[in-house]
Amino acid sequence: MTTDPGTFPKPRPLPTADTAPYWAALADERVVLQHCDACDRFVHYPRHRCPHCLSDRLSWREVSGAGTVFTFSVARQPTAVMFADEVPQVIAVVELPEGVRITSTVVDADPDTLRCGAAVVPVFDHQPGEITLLRHRLA
Amino acid sequence: MGLRGDACIVGYSEWASERPALRAPRQSLAQWADLAAEALADAGIEAGEVDGLVCTEVFESRAFVPATIAEYCGWSVNLAERVDLGGATPVGMVWRAAAAIELGICDVVVMAVPADPTPTSPVPRPFDDRMLFGASSNAWGSPQAEFDIPYGNVAQNCGFAMYAQRYHDQYGWDERARAKIVADQRVSANANPAAIFHDVPATIDDVLGSRMIADPLHLLEIVMPCSGGAAVVLCSAERAARTRHRPVHVAGFGERLTHKTPTYAPDLPHTPVAAAAHSAFSMAGVAPADVDMVQIYDCYSITALLTIEDSGFCAKGQAQAFVNDHGLSFRGDFPCNTHGGQLGFGQSGLAGGMSHVVEAVRQVQGRAGDRQLGRHDTAYVTGTGGVMSEQSALVLRGAR
């Protein structure tokens, strides 16, 4: 059986029709979020209808991508074997001023002094192929 | 609104936690039949009386699971339910069965959760990526696959650690309180021959001295996976009057789901436990202070801490002081997970969640041996699925 985890590549996003503009913007080092034109709220992750009001009147707006660390953990043991080369990995929930939270990692941070509330700015991590991951570093 | 409290849990079966597994591998359908037969015998109910079943997954079938189990066990059923709520599944199974019995559509319902090893298949099985990503789905189009897994935000450890980090940031850091939950429950595990840590004591310092896995959670704050399995039988109050043990009424329940991944939780570190608990207590007509024991889901120390708090046993932000002020073992003034909890008993897959139900029934029925509580009429039970995302709660009350 081909179940040796060491043979698995690092998981990468595979965009869908609803999410492709988000990833295309990141490749250009821009952060865009969906905005609901019916209830005037931002939406993340991108989807087909607004999770606040279920309207399909969603448009894209460019934002800075800067925010604050809402919470985080330091994975001392890889969360999955493909991330073994990244430990200790600071996995974070970043809160953007537009009112959405996103999963990110905080790079180049001292895991022992990082605190909730720390200000962070975007890091565009270009991956092989066409995907760019949105990470963060301390402002 | 809600249950009248007529339906009763009347029997159970629970296999001792094992790691490594000592019992021989069997098909999960065979384990289902074994567990069902044992639980029915415990209740004193004939197999032919079964007219409802509630299940989770079995290893041999991806779909049509209730029909496969009904056929395998030889039952014709009026309730055929599959529950998909992660660790909240067993508690969710119990209230669904109780509701169906009160509706009058069935009289005897069996639910089993097999978690012993299955035999090695002679032909290769399709790869199951849950082996790599746990409870997160890496299928194309899954939000987790696209927005969480690529960042390493996979499955459970990291998510519960993020709950802990934010909780402590808002309400204060007392790591010893989290560790005390583990240590107090270990006292109960040491009195439970079926517990994985039956022979292994643990102090607060042992917990805090164990390896850091995902800050701020240490190894001993995280459940030990093991083999096992459990089943319970529910029936109507009328049928319960002719069973072998004290009937345990399902007096109230609640359920609440809000998210899959904590990143998108609406109110973290407030949890959906609060809504589920409020429903369960109000339906049963009791207050948190009225229960004799709590058997609450504890995949992590922080899970139990948040559950104690959001269930209403103390005010928001006060759980650390509450834990420090009370004894949580079976000898203490706040008996919490008297089988050791999953932190002491072990987590036998989804059957780990059933261990809380079984221990509540065992205590209420007065069958808990060395760890039997003196007051044992009313129990509060919870199940947690995902990362504080799926919450179910029960209030159970022994027949007078």
Image (cartoon, coloured by chain):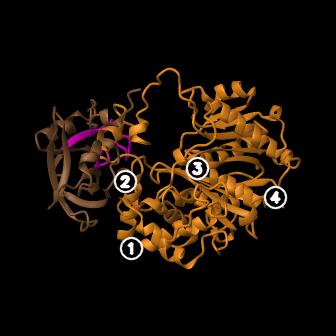
Chain colours: A brown, B orange
Front one among B67 and B327: B327
Q: Amino acid at mark 3?
A: Gly
Residue at the (73%, 65%) spot, across then down: B370
Chain identifier of the residue bearing label 1 in the image: B
User: As drawn, which residue projects farthest toward the right?
Assistant: B242
Report the disc number at residue B173. Answer: 1
Q: CA distance from mark 3 to mark 1?
A: 29 Å
Mark closer to the observer (3, 1): 3
- Magenta stretch containing residue A46, yes or no? yes
Residue at the (57%, 27%) spot, across then down: B60
Residue B87 to residue B80: above or below: below
Q: Amino acid at mark 2?
A: Cys
Front one among B87 and B291: B87
Neighbours of disc 1 within 10 Å: few (<14), some (14-19), many (20+): some
Chain identifier of the residue bearing label 4 in the image: B
Residue corresponding to mark 2: B158
Report the disc number at residue B399. Answer: 4
In the rendered structure, which disc, 4 or 3, sits on the residue that comes first in sequence? 3
Q: Which residues are magenta?
A: A39-61
Residue B72 to residue A112: above or below: above
In the rendered structure, which disc, 1 or 4, sits on the residue that comes first in sequence? 1
Report the disc number at residue B150. Answer: none
Q: CA distance from mark 3 to mark 2?
A: 20 Å
Q: Position of residue B302 (x, y in %)?
A: 46, 62
- Magenta stretch containing residue A32, yes or no? no
Q: Name the secondary structure under disc 3.
A: helix
Q: Position of residue B283 (x, y in %)?
A: 67, 58
